[in-house]
Image: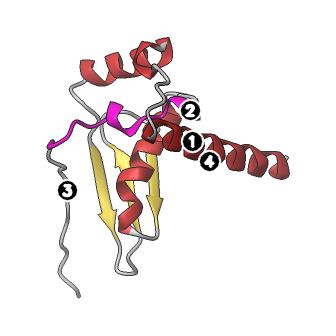
Amino acid sequence: MILQENLDSIASKFVFGASQILRGVGFDFNERNNPYVQEMLKRINLIGGINFKVEQYTDGSWTAESVNIDGIITGGADLRQQNYLIRDAIFTYFEIPPYLCNNALLRHNGEPVTAEQRIYASR
């Protein structure tokens, strides 16, 4: 079972990467017309966007959990992957196939990114 999950993960990453390369050379997957993508976008727009609480730890790792959709959570060891992994978590939650995962669907150019941060006093 674990081997199958690893193979599925590798296959998904390969399909995603290949689709990004093809998109970069002008191939159009017509994802905006896919019913699953349309439903995802509709749901996100109905709630006014997906809000995340992001926590960063002293070792550089971080977690992000949606505060308005239960079940979207992700994290990593490097902040440079944050945007990618949050988008991946959203696409996964909505069961969007890897070849339809176009990052441009989730954020418009120039849109600000907001992160909540907490500072605690050491004891």
Q: Residue at x 38, y 39 (%)?
A: 103
| Residue annotated with mark 2 | 99
Question: Do we see residue 42 in this rendering?
Answer: yes
Question: Do we see residue 72 in this rendering?
Answer: no
The residue segment tinted magenta is: 99-111
Measuring from the top left, give residue 122's x and y in whole percent: 22, 85
Say above or below: 123 vs 119: below
Which residue type does callout 2 highlight? Answer: Tyr
| Residue annotated with mark 1 | 16
Tell me the quarter of the image containing the C terminus: bottom left
Say above or below: 112 vs 56: above
| Residue annotated with mark 3 | 116
Relative placement, left or right, of 69 versus 99 is left
Which of the two residues, 34 or 78, is positioned nearer the viewer here? Answer: 34
Q: Nearer the viewer, mark 3 or mark 2?
A: 2
**Circle 4 sits in a helix, a strand or a loop, which is it?**
helix
Q: Nearer the viewer, mark 3 or mark 4?
A: 4
